[in-house]
Amino acid sequence: MPAVPSSIIEPIWAQFQALIPPVIDAHPLGCHRPRIPDRVIFDKLVQVLVLGAAYAKIADSGCSATTLRHRRDEWIAADIFTELEQLCLNAYDQMIGLELENLSVDGCIVKAPCGGEAAGRSPVDRGKRGTKRSVLVDGRGIPLGVVVAGANQNDSPLLGPTLDKLARFGFDLPERITVHLDAGYDSGKTRDLLDGLGLDYVISTKGTPLQTGARWVVERTNSWHNRGFRKLHICTERRVRVIDAFIALANAIIIVRRLIAEAWPRYRWDGRPARQP
């Protein structure tokens, strides 16, 4: 059984393949070993993301763990994962429409047993090493951007860099945007930041019963990340740029899955699933 249904992964691969730059063989005799097909590497990286397995466990006689890491780093250097995520967002916005009038931000702490650049003492796991993802979503829970930091970072200082992810949309933003936040952001510093950015806000108050409001969608997106992608649930990568690449790939899968689900009753296309996802 594939790690991701073919109805979702095939359109993602078609776009991903178009972003891969051509490979120039500089060997004077042109006698390198045959290059392993990009599709093989891509499928194995999706397995690493979904299953959370080590590269050595996913590798086989046709593709080594070293090749997986090298090709992954090539694609990261070419910024392919970020471009893929942006193209998926653009497609969703064009066909369904992003709800940018209402945004939600929240932090999510996961285990980081291997340490690394984005690891810190976790306040919810007896001081063990953990990583925090500060997630920005639209009104339907579509992930718009993620900032990675150590688990010991407070939510409030990460709000500014997280909202900076809106720059990917240029000037195509609504005139009035409301940001929905939980009680962890209930501070004067947060309000000053949002006022300076010209954003409206709804912030839960500390010391009162749990108030969900419109920010439940970001909790659902955190669940999509953790339950659907084992690599994000237990972060074993040590470098931030690799973590960001896997998050971008996970976001692309989530966006395409939601796009197909919401477009299914509205549109007809070749390869449309027989049932609504």
Image (tube, rainbow, N blue to C red):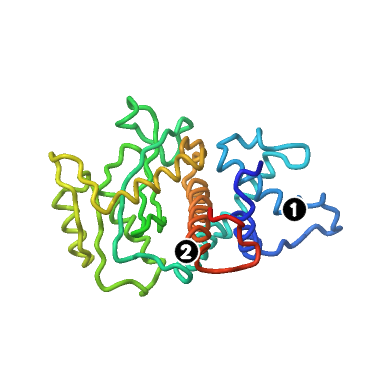
Q: Is residue 24 left or right of residue 256?
A: right
Q: Is residue 44 left or right of residue 94?
A: right
SS type, badge 1: loop
Above or below for 86 versus 180 = below
Rendered-image quadrant of the N terminus:
top right
Q: Nearer the viewer, residue 267 or 258?
A: 267
For residue 89, the mark is 2
For residue 145, the mark is none
**Residue 217 in view:** yes
Q: Is residue 120 left or right of residue 81?
A: left
Amino acid at the residue labelled 1: Pro
SS type, badge 2: helix
The numbered mark, 1 or 2, whose residue comes first in the sequence reads 1
Q: Nearer the viewer, residue 224 or 49?
A: 224
Q: Is residue 47 left or right of residue 225?
A: right
Horizontal and vertical percent position of residue 61: 78, 37
Q: Residues within 10 Å of mark 1 (few under 14, many from 20)?
A: few
Horizontal and vertical percent position of residue 191: 16, 56
**Residue 20 in view:** no
| Spatial CA span between label 1 and label 2 | 27 Å
Q: Residue shown at 54%/69% (left/top)?
A: 267
Above or below for 65 versus 147 = above
Q: Residue shown at 38%/51% (left/top)?
A: 147
Q: Residue shown at 37%/58% (left/top)?
A: 140
Horizontal and vertical percent position of residue 119: 40, 37
Q: Residue shown at 63%/37% (left/top)?
A: 55
Amino acid at the residue labelled 2: Leu
